[in-house]
Image (cartoon, rainbow, N blue to C red):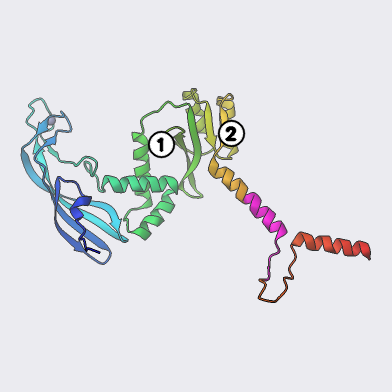
Amino acid sequence: MAQQEIDFSKFYPESTKILKIVNMKNEIHIFMKSLTHMQTCPACKKECNEYNSTYHRKIQDLPIFKKTVYIHLTAYRYYCHNSECKQKVFCETVDGFFGFKKRMTERLEDFLITLTLKTSCEGASRVCEKIGVNISGDTLIRLIIKAANKIEPVKTDMIGVDDWAYKKGHTYGTIIVDGRTHKPIDLLDGRDGKNLKEWLKQNQQVKIVTRDRASAYASAINEILPQAMQIADRFHLHQNILTAIKDVTAQNIPAKVKIVQNNEQKVTEPVNNKKKLIKTQRKKA
Ligand SMILES: [Zn+2]
């Protein structure tokens, strides 16, 4: 098989150039510079092509093999020559990669938001520690709140409602997902149904609600939108089936089952059968 060297520049925007990569015990430091010649002024949206100065930024990126990755970027400050614009000088950004005043790349931020919403801030923080992302639980909470504030209000007739843990066992919230796009459309404080009621009052167009088994959500929906169809979500149906199987198994299989070796005869009987045998023997006696 032909050997192929990994071209690291493919993982970074074309408007940057990698100068040096330093591989340390627990961290990888990637030094790069910006190659931009033009930027759009964030205030007046005019195109600007004159540099003012350079500045250095340290941005965390996705980890590589459990090592924390830091990008050290030499970027430009640009002049805005629009006489009507109040923004005379501004720092450049690379859309879709890192934004103004951001300390992490957008791809790392996206990953952390998804991970946190799927687990909890505490859980995500522990996963991050294992895989080499340097971030605290508090920063994850701030990330989620910022992301929630950016969510555009969506009017949909089909929603999914579930609880979500800021901190498992302590602080919970309620996440509302668009049932058609499967994208979050709101995050509410608490999971007692109070804030859900307020949300439903503002969203009377909802016809179908997929929810977990929490009675607080059921009564909030019944009270505000009694005509809406309520559906148990697939995760909780699976959970119900698994619990039922576990109960039946625990009733019918003895705690110890002897594994039959070669010519040995199997001697263990299921618990229920044993009871039946005892009963029959008593009757006979
Ligand atoms: Zn401007």
Q: Position of residue 108 (x, y in %)?
A: 30, 49
Residue behind label 1 places its C-beta within 8 angstroms of ligand 1: no
The magenta stretch spans residue 31: no
Q: Quadrant of residue 277?
A: bottom right
The label on residue 183 is: 1
Give me the residue at 37% from left, 60% from top.
Answer: 130
Look at the numbered discs 2 and 1 and tell me whether their residues touch, using CB distance below 8 Å.
no
Q: On the rendered image, what quadrant is the C terminus found in?
A: bottom right
Residue 17 placement (x, y as % from top left): 13, 51
Residue 164 tag number: none
Residue bounds of the magenta highlight: 243-258
Q: Residue at image x 66%, y 75%? A: 261
What residue is shown at x 12% (from left), y 29% (from top)? 46
Q: Which mark is residue 218?
A: 2
Vertical placement of 284 versus 168: above or below? below
Question: Is residue 193 visible to the viewer in this orientation of the structure?
Answer: no
Foreground residue among 13 and 77? 13
Q: Nearer the viewer, residue 85 or 105?
A: 105
Q: Is residue 284 left or right of residue 166?
A: right
Task: Please name whichever residue, 167 or 177, is drawn nearer the observer in this view of the structure.
Answer: 177
User: SS at mark 1?
Assistant: loop
Q: Position of residue 134 (x, y in %)?
A: 31, 56
Dividing the picture into quadrants, the one containing residue 125 is: bottom left
Residue at x-position 63% and y-position 50% = 243
* Crowd tier of the residue under label 1, counting other residues whose Cα lies within 10 Å: few below 14, some 14–19, many 20 or above: few
Q: Main secondary structure of the magenta part?
A: helix
Q: Ligand 1 is found in which quarter of the picture?
A: top left
Q: Identify residue type, mark 1.
A: Lys
Tag in front: 2 or 1? 1
Near mark 2 (Cα within 10 A), the count class, few <14, some 14-19 or many ≥20, is some
Q: Where is 263 relative to 236, above or below?
A: below
